[in-house]
Amino acid sequence: MEEVESFILTAKDGTSLNGREWLVNEPKSIICLIHGLGEHLGRYEHVAEFLNASKVSVFGIDLRGHGKSEGKRGHTPSHEMLLDDVEELLMYARAEYNDLPIFLYGHSLGGNIVANYILQKNTNELQGAIISSPWFELAEEPAEWQIKLAKFFSGVLPSLTQSNQLDINHLTNDDQVNQAYKNDSLVHGRISTRMFTECYQAGLWALENAHKNKIPLLIYHGTEDAITSANASKIFTEKAGDDVTYHQWEGVKHEPHNDFKKEELFKTILKWVLDKSE
């Protein structure tokens, strides 16, 4: 039997974070899910349902400034605060299940956050992590002057937001998914100067420090991703240790879980999770 419930977490700075849990009876393992920039947890309903069908319970939050969580759209006061929010989610999930294998799963910006979490925080509670199309580097890197300008405004106007310049056609090969994203009232297209500079730097930091990884990882990227760099994912994989599995999905765009090979992807994730849970 599956059970879907909402919950609220209070972040360290008092921000209310909207959470959702997809629970099953007698689960084999737990996944804590971190979504990407501009979107929200509701776009992962089908991912959670697939995992539930194989006895994996799923927890997740809308990031601050996203979905139904509090905070200015597309803004965070710091990258560190995003890591703290992940810690709150993990503590919540662990309180519900104190004896099961627990995994972090992050897509895009969520992949950036998860990678930084496992490199900087205590991972003793984690069995492994899944990193999907991570933002280590962008597919098209900004010009140096743009980075300098963003850093300047991050210092003087940190919460100033602008368009994230996302082309919805870069999300997937499924036009229905792309149009649904466009029409989704909980989706936004904003990013603040502080959020951009901190997340941009955090992606580069993760690449530099991938060798500090201590847990099993599953990393994957589509070859047609025009948003985040598949090559950067390969570099991270090569540096992150022996127990790292990398999958390259041919012809797939930025959201493999919403693209035409998603069923194959879900089976890959599930097999890896169950293998690492033993």
Image: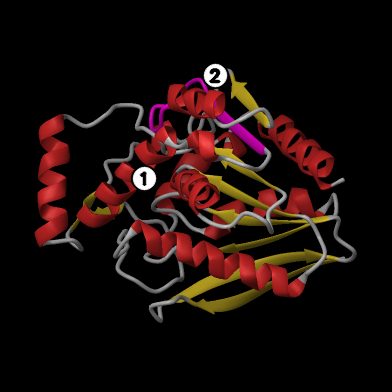
Secondary structure under the numbered disc 2 in the rendered image: loop
Q: Nearer the viewer, mark 1 or mark 2?
A: 1
Quadrant of the frame with the C terminus: top right
Query: Local crowd at mark 2 within 10 Å, few (<14), some, or many (≥20)?
Result: some
Q: Residue at label 2?
A: 251
Task: Mark yes or no: residue 253 visible.
Answer: yes
- What label sits on residue 202 in the rendered view? 1
Residue 114 at what x, y percent from top left? 52, 49
Q: Which residues are magenta?
A: 217-229
Q: Residue at x 56, y 59 (%)?
A: 42
Instruction: Give the position of the N terminus as an image quadrant.
Output: bottom right
Task: Return the x and y of residue 45 as percentages of the image width and height.
Answer: 64, 55
Disc 1 secondary structure class: helix
Looking at the picture, which amino acid does disc 1 mark?
Answer: Ala
Above or below, 37 relative to 142: below
Q: Is residue 190 left or right of residue 238?
A: left
**Left or right for 91, reference 133:** right
Left or right: 262 as drawn, with respect to 165: right
Q: Quadrant of residue 29?
A: bottom right
**Picture quadrant of residue 20:** bottom right
Other residues around mark 1 within 10 Å, as few (<14) / some (14–19) / many (≥20): many
Give the mark, 1 or 2, whose residue is nearer the N terminus: 1
Which residue occupies the foreground of this view, 73 or 118?
A: 118
Amino acid at the residue labelled 2:
Gly
In whole angstroms, how far apart are the C-alphas of marks 1 and 2?
A: 28 Å
Q: Residue at x 38, y 32 (%)?
A: 227
